[in-house]
Image (tube, rainbow, N blue to C red):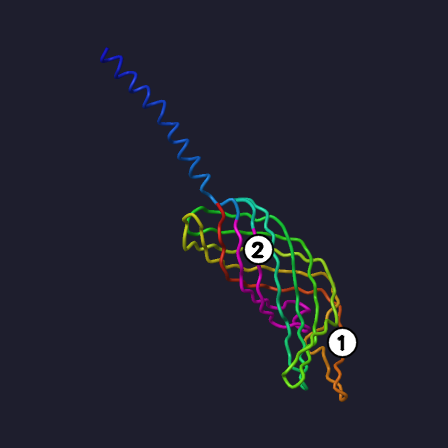
């Protein structure tokens, strides 16, 4: 009887050990982030023809990624490539807003992860004039806007500060962005007239930029 009991006990240990391992593995998989979101400060450098008509453009972007290793990335951004005071209480601002979606591949599962992505979407180029009376009141006038298709590809690294229930990481990356032929007001495209009005000139070119980014990514389990 003792031998039979020892045999049964050994068989129980052998059969339950794989189940425990499977449960541990399932628990580890389930603890991976199902999605993530974040925000970045960006700095865009003009490339190609946009070097003559544009300028370094600071801004910010927000993104969300659905999935773990291979996921769907959705991101949008806003940047300013010219902001100038024209005198007599008149200021002009030229901006770009973008929205895109595409696949993202993330490698690694520890404190350092590498990712790459590509997106397709659209970009809106627009300019505004702000006029103030003695600094007491301000009126904004939207004077132009043009939509175009946009593509981008890039990558970066996630440096995790926390891997607990809410993973938090520093996001450092770069991308190349191309906006198809678009009509916009270039840098120095506004001219102040003697009568106090402002005249704008337009150009139509493709816009290519190199965008550097740094921000924060937050995981969702």
Could you say which quadrant of the image residue 48 lies in?
A: bottom right
Q: Which residue is mark 1?
A: 201
Q: Residue at position x 53%, y 61% from top?
A: 40
In the rendered structure, does residue 46 fall within the stretch colored magenta? Answer: yes
Q: Residue at position x 56%, y 67% from top?
A: 43
Looking at the image, residue 22 sits to the left or right of residue 94; the answer is: left
Q: Residue furthest bottom?
A: 194
In the rendered structure, does residue 47 fall within the stretch colored magenta? Answer: yes
Relative height, residue 167 to residue 84 (above, below): above
Q: Which residue is mark 2?
A: 63
Helix, strand or loop at label 2? It is: strand
Task: Please name the predominant secondary structure of the magenta segment in the image.
Answer: strand
Helix, strand or loop at label 1? It is: loop
Give x and y (percent) for residue 25. Answer: 42, 35
Give x and y (percent) for residue 92. Answer: 68, 77
Density class for disc 1 (Cα within 10 Å; few <14, some 14-19, many ≥20) is few
Q: Residue furthest top?
A: 1
Could you say which quadrant of the image residue 193 lies in?
A: bottom right
Density class for disc 2 (Cα within 10 Å; few <14, some 14-19, many ≥20) is some
Looking at the image, residue 61 sits to the left or right of residue 219; the answer is: right
Q: Nearer the viewer, residue 53 or 216?
A: 216
- Numbered label tally: 2
Look at discs 1 and 2 and give the one toward the viewer.
2
Q: Residue at position x 26%, y 15% from top?
A: 5
Give x and y (percent) for residue 108. Answer: 46, 47
């Amino acid at each position: 009887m003792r031998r039979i009991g020892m045999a049964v006990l050994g068989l129980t240990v052998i059969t339950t050990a794989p189940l425990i391992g499977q449960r541990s593995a399932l628990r580890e998989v389930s603890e991976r982030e199902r999605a993530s979101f974040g925000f970045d400060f960006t700095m865009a450098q003009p490339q190609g023809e946009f070097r003559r008509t544009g300028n370094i453009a600071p801004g910010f972007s927000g993104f969300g990624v659905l999935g773990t290793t291979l996921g769907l990335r959705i991101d949008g951004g806003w940047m300013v490539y010219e902001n100038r005071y024209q005198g007599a209480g008149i200021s002009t601002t030229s901006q770009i807003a973008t929205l895109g979606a595409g696949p993202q591949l993330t490698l690694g599962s520890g404190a350092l992860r590498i990712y790459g992505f590509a997106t397709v979407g659209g970009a809106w180029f627009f300019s505004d004039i702000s006029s103030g009376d003695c600094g007491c009141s301000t009126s904004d006038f939207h004077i132009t806007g043009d939509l175009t298709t946009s593509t981008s590809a890039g990558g970066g690294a996630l440096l995790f500060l926390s891997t607990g229930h809410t993973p938090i990481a520093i996001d450092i990356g770069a991308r190349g962005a191309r906006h198809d032929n678009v009509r916009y007001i270039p840098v120095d495209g506004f001219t102040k007239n003697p009568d106090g009005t402002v005249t704008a000139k337009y150009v139509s070119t493709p816009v290519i930029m190199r965008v550097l980014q740094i921000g924060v990514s937050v995981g969702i389990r």
